[in-house]
Image (spheres, rainbow, N blue to C red):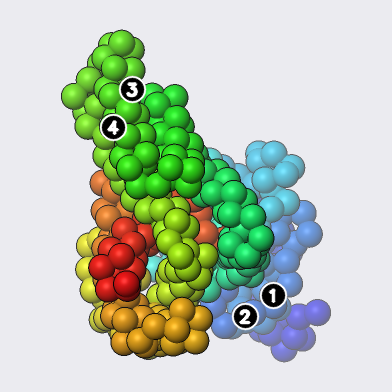
Amino acid sequence: MSDPADTATSSPREETTSSSHPETASGPVITELEGFPDPVRDPDTGMIIPQSRKERRALEAAQAAAAASSTVGEPPVPPEQLPAAVAAAPLVSRIPGTGSGAAIDPRGGRAAIGIDLTDEGAQAALDSPLELPAAEEPKKSRAGRNLPAAIITGVILLGTAIVGLLYVHLVLVVLIVVLLLMGTWEIARALRPRGIDVPLAPLWVASAAMPLTAYFGGIDAMMFALFGTMLLALYWCVVESSTTPVGTVLSAMLILLWVPFLLSFGVVLLHEPQGSLMVASLLLIVVANDTGGYVVGVLFGKHPMAPKVSPKKSWEGLMGSLVAAMGVGAGCFHWALHEPWWIGALLGFAIVFAATAGDFSESMVKRELDIKDMGNSLPGHGGAMDRLDSLVFAAPVAYTVFVVLMP
């Protein structure tokens, strides 16, 4: 209900406006006014029905400004000419920084704002499309991961590895083969948009041959598998007559050396007298490196190491990785391997920098290919390569430290 005093003192023009709104019947629909959070609206058109003189003046000012702004483009479509679904939807949104309501041109989704059109910021707002609120995405951790899914996936992978280490080594080897098959496939698929079609068959043969030969025959057999699969990949690329043979061959060689070859050094460790404990120490140190860097980086990370390559990796996170990895390494060597603790600390120190180099290597490849993750096969972690990136560089470092420094 309107105020009686306001009604009694209103001019004839105001009375006409409040009853039938003739001047807005073919103009823009004003549905929000600054300073009137809950106005009365016409149920048919959705426009505001002023209930006081102050509200009427604000409405008329917004209508006049909207009408003036219509000279910038075509006039808006009258509400009665809109489809029912459009007419029933909210037609107005307030743009921050404006002091009055906003009317929408339904045909173009453009905003006609009751502000000074000579203002550059206002004109930019008029020239921009109306942005509707985006659907809310699932919450993620500060490091960008789905933390619960990442923890579950990590527990499954680590649990399978522990079962393979304690009971049947071949279970661990099969797990490594599966991860290598996934990793090589992810890299090959990521290269295709760049016109490099690396054949999968030789990559998958290498992913199975290198760890299996390392397990059954040792490092010598693994080297023969490397040379054999490199020749296979070379001939396969030549026979397929790729449009970019040089890039395809070089990419295939890079994948073979980067993923299955380096990771197979971890399988070779199983031939050592305390091979299971050595591989377990390697895995625990890598997990400590990732966990320490993640936790400290999330809580205290402020100084990125290489913002153009991996902006989320900070110097503070590196310090966390060093403390965690060296501590776990010292503990593994002292209590599990019964070797001098300082060798374990040295191994942890070396693995941190090897794992960081592996992470940077994959990050550079992903940035070059303009992708966020290599894949999505491991929930919470991205692709298989997003988990193997640290381990593939850490495995040969661990093998070298174990063979050189331990009798």
Can you tell which of label 3 and label 2 is closer to the viewer? 3
Q: In which quadrant of the rendered view does residue 189 lie?
A: top left
Measuring from the top left, give residue 88's x and y in whole percent: 73, 51
Check disc 1 and give the amino acid type.
Pro
Q: Residue at x 53, y 73 (%)?
A: 141
- Could you tell me if the residues under marks 1 and 4 are in contact, i.e. CB atoms within 8 Å? no
The crowd level at tag 4 (other Cα within 10 Å; few <14, some 14-19, many 20+) is: few
In the displayed structure, would residue 389 be above or below residue 328? above
Check disc 4 and give the amino acid type.
Phe
Element at label 3 = helix
Residue at mark 4: 227
Can you tell which of label 1 and label 4 is closer to the viewer? 4
In the displayed structure, would residue 137 be above or below residue 27? below
The residues bearing labels 2 and 1 have C-alpha atoms spaced at a distance of 6 Å
Element at label 2 = loop
Q: Residue at x 72, y 88 (%)?
A: 5
Measuring from the top left, give residue 195's x and y in whole percent: 29, 26
Measuring from the top left, give residue 133's x and y in whole percent: 56, 61
Q: In which quadrant of the rendered view does residue 236 lie?
A: top left
The residues bearing labels 3 and 2 have C-alpha atoms spaced at a distance of 75 Å
Sequence-wise, the earlier of marks 2 and 4 is 2
Q: Residue at x 28, y 24 (%)?
A: 231
